[in-house]
Image: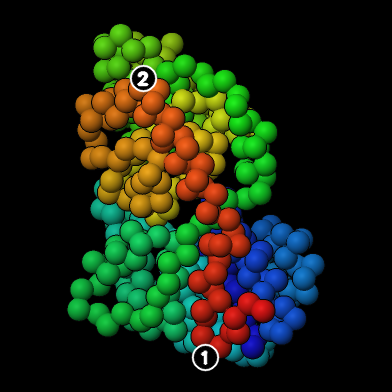
Amino acid sequence: MRLLVNTLSIGSMSGQHVVYGFLRPFTRWMTPNHALVILHYESEKPPAEITAQGVSTICLPDNLKHWAKRTLWEATKLPQVVRQQKADLVLTVSGAITPNCPVPQITLCQNPWCYVPAAHQNWKERFKARLQRSGYTRAFRDSAMMIYISGHLRDLYRRGNPGVQETRSEIAYVGLNEDTYQAARELEGAPREPLSILSVSAMAPWKGAETLVKAVALLRQREISATLKLVGPWPDVSHEQEIRRMIRGLALQDSVSILGRVSDEELHRLYGTSQVFSLMSSCESFGIPAAEAMAFGTPVVSTDCCAIAEVCKPAGQFGPVGDPEWTANALEAALTDQKQWQNWSEQARLRAATLTWENCARPFQKIPGLVEKL
């Protein structure tokens, strides 16, 4: 069996974490009985530990990175590459399938964005979402197999395709890297910063930063001196400016810090020394930062409308989107009830321990035509 993996649609660090995290154990299982070929951009080479296992690569220029150019290339050129490589299967990581592909396709689904209207900020994004939904429908119906990174994401595909005959599917949760587990072990027992809240994500408008800021203001009114750290890039500069104005307007400059990107070492330290992790997002297909926080025994407060609740349920509380009052109440419980905090913390570590890549990648062994792990 010869499998071509098309990684051209990854587009983000979290996407790389997911795709290459799955491929690390999967490559070990495949080789040498099966062959693996990875299609990638010149600036996004696969990790050496994967290529060292006898994996072949095909490099494309970075000028094809724009989604429209990539889509055109895949529709017109990928079929020829598949034939040249004599591939038996194609694994695509975009949530869609490529038209005119001459062999069956396996689809890894990671992105819920096009099914969540609140995440579309303008007509261009609504148009792109409509195109994505069309591509997702074809995959939902015609893929040889769909692999979703959460049950929540599969439910979004199902609700978005009523009446469409669904192909076979599996759920493969996202794993945590060994350096995360190692850092968590090293920080176990480190003192927690009292009343500290950590939020980590690419802070897009649908991530709920405004809900957290308002919740902190409510906690301060209750004479709970909570602090909030917002960690991660801000894709929309105007949204960051809006949140900064809100912080000033609520006189929270000493309580809320916008840290932006931080090093992995600093991120791990924040996970291990913050008292609670919170992300009040309306759109998450998994929630990698929340899962990482659990590895450090940090309880989670989040929404119940996306995959974080599914992934982290034993480790905290999960409630409505855009509700500062509910959020403040949940944070207060996590910050002030030591017995409850300890229970959530223990459950967080237990849940995170199941999210190894070895465990999470096992559904890939069910890809049609591939033998089970020996």
- Is label 2 in contact with label 1 (beta carbons under 8 Å)? no
Determine the residue positioned at 39% across, 16% down: 226
Residue 7 vs 281, above or below: the answer is: below
Crowding near the residue tagged with mark 2, few <14, some 14–19, many ≥20 C-alpha atoms within 10 Å? some
The Cα–Cα distance between marks 2 and 1, rounded to whole angstroms, is 59 Å
Residue 148 percent location from the top left of the image: 42, 66
Could you tell me the amino acid type at mark 2? Thr
Residue 340 vs 6, above or below: the answer is: above
Residue 284 percent location from the top left of the image: 38, 50
Residue 147 vs 78, above or below: the answer is: above
Look at the image and tell me whether residue 202 can be seen: no
Determine the residue positioned at 77% across, 71% down: 53
Please report whichever mark, 2 or 1, sits nearer to the chain's N-terminal start: 1
Quadrant of the rendering where the C terminus is positioned: bottom right
Residue 81 percent location from the top left of the image: 63, 84
Residue bearing the label numbered 2:
336
Q: What element carries label 2?
A: helix
Q: Nearer the viewer, residue 67 or 46?
A: 46
The answer to whether residue 72 is left or right of residue 315 is right
Residue 73 vs 268, above or below: the answer is: below
Determine the residue positioned at 40% across, 29% down: 341
Colour mapping: rainbow
Residue 317 percent location from the top left of the image: 32, 38
In the picture, the disc for residue 369 is none
Q: Which of the 4 image quadrants contains residue 315?
A: top left
The answer to whether residue 269 is left or right of residue 167 is right
Residue bearing the label numbered 1:
102
Could you tell me the amino acid type at mark 1? Pro
Q: Is mark 1 on a helix, strand or loop?
A: loop
Q: Nearer the viewer, residue 106 or 297?
A: 297
Q: Which of the 4 image quadrants contains residue 140?
A: bottom left
